[in-house]
Image (cartoon, rainbow, N blue to C red):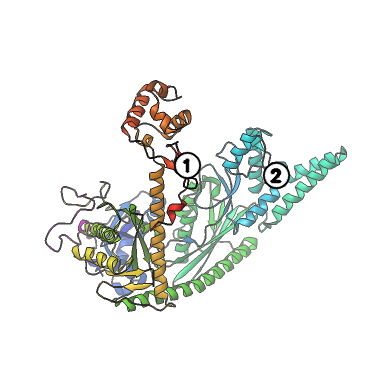
C-alpha cells in the first residue's frame, strides 16, 4: 500500500487549468482517469488526510504510485479526452457500464449496391442504418416480416444473392412477393435502393404521410374497379398498422428523445435507456456497473452519456435527452452532445406531463434490473468465492488464488506442437489475457519438455516486465534478465518478441502480471516440469498444480500422492472449467495451424503475387502440377501476369520440391491435382492431443 504523500506533486507544479489526469499503480498501469475544470483544485482533494476520503477514493490513492495530467483548452475537450482514455486504458477504478447482453438491431446495409435488411449485433458499421436496439431478435423478425409486404427489400445473404443471380431464378421470398428480386433483374439497383430508403423512412417514424398515400391509392383503385389491387393495398395498410402497433405511442407530437433512468445502492448502479423516435419507443437497453469510485447520480448519468453517445454522430444523438439528475457542471456535457449531433441538444430533467410519467416507467425498469442483477450476482459470487476457498484449502495456499493461469499442450502425432495459456480472474474467464505459443526449442512429441519451455517463456517475460518497471533488476544468481525468444535491447531493456518496444504508457502489457496459481493439464511429470521452470527463474511465490484427466486428480510438485477433491466440490468444478478451457483453446489453435499448413502452396511464398493472381494462375492451368510444367511464355498468357512475375513464379516452382500426392482415404485413389489439399481431415481428428 503506497503513501499518497510519496508521489504528491510539488506545490505550484499543478496548473490551474482544465485538464484530464491519470493515476498509475506501481506497474505503470493506469488505474483511474478523471477530468477537472481546475486540475490544481481537483488533485488537491486526493492528497488530504486519508481519514477524510471516501473509502473507494482512499483505496485508489493508496493503490496508485504516481499521477500525471494533460492540460486542455476547454471542459468539452476534457470530457472527450476522458472518454477516450477510459476506453483505451480500461482503468479499474473508473465506473464502466457494460451491456448485460448484446442487443440486436434492425440494420439496413445502405453501403451495399443492393441494400439488405437484417438483424445485427455488436459494433456499428459505417454506411449501415440502424434501428433499435430491440429486446429480442424475434421481435425484429416479426416486424420485418410484416413490412416486407409493402417494402420487399432484399433480406438474403451475399451467397444466396449471388447464387440466384447465377442460376437466373429468385429464392422463395421472390416467388411469394416478399422480395423484389433484384438478383434476377426484376427491378434495377436504383429502384431497389429507393425501396430501401422508403423502408428506412417508415422505420424512422415518418409513417403518417406514407399511410395516407397508400389509402389514397386504395380508394383510386376501388373507384376504377381494380378490386384485386385495392385489396392488396388494403392488406398492405393493415400489415403496416400492425407493425406500428408493436411500439405504442408514448409521447405526443412525434417527439425524438432518449430517457435515461438510474437505480443505485452503495455498491452498484443500474441504468435503463428508452429510445423514443416519432413518439414511439423504438428500443430499450440497460447496463449494470460496480460503483468502484465515489460518484453521485449526476456522475453516473455523465458516464452513461459518454458510453451511449461516445461513438455516435448525427441523428443517432436525439434532439432531447431526459435524465433523473444533471451532471455537474451541465454546460460542457450539453455542448459535447450538441457537437456530436451537429445541432442543439436539450439535456434536462422532466418536470411534468407524459415525459415525467414515462421517466417513472424507465425508473421502475432500472429498479427491477438492479434487483434481478443482485439476485444473480449473489449466487454467482457465493459460488465463485466458495470454489476459490476450497482450492486454497486443498492446495495449502496462504490466500485464495484470484488469478489462475492454465497451460495445455496440443499436437497431432508430434506435428504442429502448440500450447495455450488461459486466464481466470475471480473465477471468471479473462479472454483478453489468453495467449498462444508455438514450441520452438525442439521438434517432436514431448509434452513434459514442451510444458517446461512454455512455462519458462511465460515467466521470463514476466521478469522482463518487472525489470522494465524497476521492480526487479537482477536474476537471483546475479545475472541480467534472460531474453525471451532472444530479444533484448543493447541497454538490457526488454522488447517485445516482434522487436517493437514494450509499452510503458499504462496499457495492459503481455505477461506483466503474475498468477497466484498455475494449473497444468497433466499429472506428476508435467507438474514437475512446470515447477522446475519456475525454480530455474527464481520464482517461488507462484503455486503449481496439475489436473489429470483420467481420475480428475490434483497433483502437487512436492507430494507423491495426488489430492482428491470431492466430485461435488465447487473447487474441483472450477479447476475442470479452467483445464477444459485451456484444452479447447489449444486444440483450436493447433487445428488452425495444421489447416494452414495443409492448404499452403509454393505460390504463397512468391513475392508480389496476391490472392487474385494466384487464383487466376491455378484456374488457368487447372493444377499446380501443370503450372510447374509451364514455360515462362505460357505463364505470361494469364491475364494480369507480366513477364517479370512469370519468371519469379517459374523460379519459385522450380526450386520448390513437389509435394507428395494426396490420397483419397476412402478409396485409396491418388489425387493428381497436387494444388488442392486433402479434403478429408476427419480421420486425423481422432489422433489429436
Number of numbered discs on residues:
2
Where does the C terminus fall, quadrant-wise?
Answer: bottom left
Residue furthest to the top: 633
Which element type, helix, strand or loop, lies under badge 1?
loop
Q: Which residues are magenta?
A: 467-491
Q: Residue 351 placed where, x, y %? A: 59, 63
Q: What residue is at 47 percent from the left and 28 percent from the top?
A: 620
Above or below — where is 138 with respect to 55? above
Task: Count neighbours of disc 2 (C-alpha within 10 A) and say few if under 14, some if 14 to 19, many if 20 or more.
Answer: many
Q: Is residue 661 visible?
A: yes
Viewer-proximal residue, 409 or 421? 409
Pick the front one: 251 or 154 = 154
Residue 478 part of the magenta-drawn span = yes
Estimate the x, y position of residue 352 in percent, counting from the top left: 62, 63
| Residue in front for this viewpoint, 670 or 162 | 670
Q: Name the disc covering residue 669, or none.
A: 1
- Residue 637 disc label: none
Give the percent coordinates (x, y) of residue 80.
Answer: 41, 51
Dots 1, 2 in contact, CB < 8 A: no
Query: Measuring 38% from the left and 29% from the top, which residue is drawn there?
Result: 628
Near-viewer residue (323 or 404): 404
Give the residue furthest to the left: 478
Q: Quadrant of residue 432?
A: bottom left
Residue 79: x and y in percent read 41, 53
Amino acid at each position: 500500500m503506497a503513501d499518497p504523500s510519496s508521489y504528491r506533486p510539488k506545490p505550484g507544479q499543478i496548473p490551474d487549468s482544465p485538464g484530464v489526469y491519470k493515476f498509475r499503480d506501481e506497474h505503470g498501469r493506469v488505474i483511474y482517469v478523471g477530468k477537472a475544470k481546475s486540475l490544481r483544485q481537483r488533485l488537491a482533494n486526493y492528497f488530504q488526510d486519508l481519514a477524510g476520503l471516501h473509502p473507494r477514493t482512499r483505496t485508489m490513492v493508496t493503490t496508485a504510485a504516481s499521477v500525471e495530467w494533460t492540460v486542455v483548452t476547454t471542459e468539452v475537450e476534457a470530457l472527450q479526452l476522458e472518454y477516450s482514455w477510459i476506453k483505451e486504458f480500461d482503468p479499474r477504478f473508473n465506473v464502466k457500464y457494460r451491456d448485460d447482453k448484446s442487443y440486436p438491431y434492425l440494420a439496413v446495409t445502405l453501403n451495399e449496391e443492393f441494400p439488405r435488411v437484417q438483424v445485427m449485433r455488436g459494433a456499428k458499421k459505417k454506411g449501415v442504418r440502424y434501428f433499435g436496439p430491440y429486446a429480442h431478435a424475434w421481435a425484429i423478425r416479426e416486424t420485418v416480416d410484416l413490412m416486407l409486404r409493402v417494402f420487399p427489400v432484399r433480406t438474403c445473404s451475399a451467397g444466396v444473392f449471388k447464387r440466384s443471380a447465377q442460376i437466373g431464378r429468385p429464392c422463395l421470398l421472390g416467388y411469394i412477393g416478399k422480395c423484389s428480386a433484384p438478383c434476377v433483374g426484376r427491378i434495377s439497383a436504383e429502384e431497389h435502393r429507393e425501396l430501401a430508403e422508403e423502408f428506412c423512412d417508415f422505420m424512422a417514424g415518418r409513417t403518417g404521410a406514407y399511410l395516407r398515400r397508400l389509402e389514397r391509392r386504395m380508394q383510386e383503385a376501388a373507384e376504377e374497379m381494380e378490386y384485386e389491387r385495392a385489396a392488396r393495398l388494403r392488406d398492405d395498410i393493415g400489415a403496416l398498422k400492425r407493425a406500428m402497433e408493436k411500439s405504442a405511442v408514448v409521447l405526443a407530437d412525434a417527439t425524438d428523445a432518449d430517457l435515461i433512468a438510474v437505480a443505485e445502492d452503495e455498491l452498484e448502479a443500474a441504468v435503463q435507456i428508452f429510445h423514443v423516435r416519432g413518439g414511439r419507443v423504438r428500443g430499450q437497453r440497460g447496463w449494470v456497473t460496480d460503483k468502484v469510485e465515489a460518484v453521485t447520480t449526476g456522475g453516473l448519468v455523465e458516464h452513461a452519456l459518454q458510453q451511449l453517445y461516445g461513438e455516435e454522430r448525427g441523428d443517432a444523438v436525439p434532439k432531447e435527452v431526459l435524465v433523473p439528475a444533471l451532471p455537474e457542471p451541465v454546460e460542457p456535457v450539453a455542448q459535447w452532445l450538441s457537437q456530436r449531433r451537429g445541432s442543439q441538444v436539450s439535456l434536462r430533467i422532466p418536470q411534468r406531463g407524459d415525459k415525467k410519467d414515462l421517466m417513472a416507467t424507465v425508473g421502475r425498469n432500472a429498479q427491477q434490473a438492479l434487483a434481478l442483477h443482485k439476485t444473480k450476482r449473489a449466487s454467482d459470487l457465493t459460488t465463485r468465492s466458495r470454489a476459490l476457498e476450497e482450492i486454497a484449502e486443498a492446495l495449502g495456499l496462504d490466500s485464495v488464488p484470484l488469478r489462475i493461469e492454465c497451460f495445455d499442450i496440443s499436437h497431432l502425432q508430434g506435428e504442429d506442437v502448440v500450447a495455450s495459456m488461459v486466464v481466470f480472474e475471480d473465477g471468471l474467464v479473462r479472454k483478453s489475457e489468453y495467449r498462444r505459443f508455438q514450441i520452438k526449442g525442439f521438434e517432436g512429441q514431448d509434452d513434459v519438455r514442451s510444458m517446461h519451455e512454455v512455462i519458462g517463456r511465460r515467466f521470463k517475460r514476466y521478469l522482463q516486465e518487472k525489470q522494465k518497471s524497476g521492480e526487479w533488476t537482477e536474476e537471483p544468481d546475479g545475472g541480467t534478465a534472460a531474453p525471451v525468444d532472444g530479444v533484448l535491447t543493447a541497454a538490457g531493456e526488454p522488447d517485445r518478441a516482434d522487436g517493437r518496444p514494450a509499452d510503458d504508457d499504462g496499457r495492459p502489457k503481455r505477461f506483466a502480471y503474475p498468477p497466484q496459481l498455475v494449473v497444468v493439464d497433466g499429472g506428476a511429470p508435467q507438474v514437475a516440469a512446470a515447477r522446475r521452470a519456475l525454480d530455474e527463474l527464481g520464482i517461488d511465490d507462484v503455486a503449481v498444480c496439475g489436473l489429470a484427466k483420467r481420475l480428475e486428480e490434483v497433483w502437487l510438485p512436492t507430494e507423491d500422492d495426488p489430492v482428491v477433491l470431492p466430485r461435488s466440490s465447487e473447487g474441483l468444478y472450477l479447476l475442470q472449467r479452467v483445464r477444459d478451457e485451456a484444452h479447447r483453446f489449444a486444440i483450436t489453435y493447433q487445428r488452425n495451424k495444421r489447416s494452414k499448413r495443409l492448404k499452403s502452396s509454393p505460390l504463397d511464398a512468391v513475392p508480389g503475387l496476391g490472392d487474385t493472381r494466384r487464383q487466376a494462375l491455378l484456374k488457368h492451368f487447372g493444377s499446380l502440377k501443370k503450372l510447374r510444367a509451364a514455360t515462362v511464355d505460357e505463364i505470361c498468357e494469364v491475364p494480369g501476369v507480366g513477364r517479370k512475375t512469370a519468371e519469379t513464379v517459374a523460379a519459385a516452382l522450380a526450386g520448390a520440391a513437389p509435394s507428395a500426392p494426396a490420397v483419397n482415404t476412402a478409396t485409396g485413389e491418388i489425387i493428381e491435382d497436387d494444388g488442392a489439399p486433402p479434403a478429408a481431415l476427419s480421420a486425423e481428428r481422432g489422433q489429436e492431443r
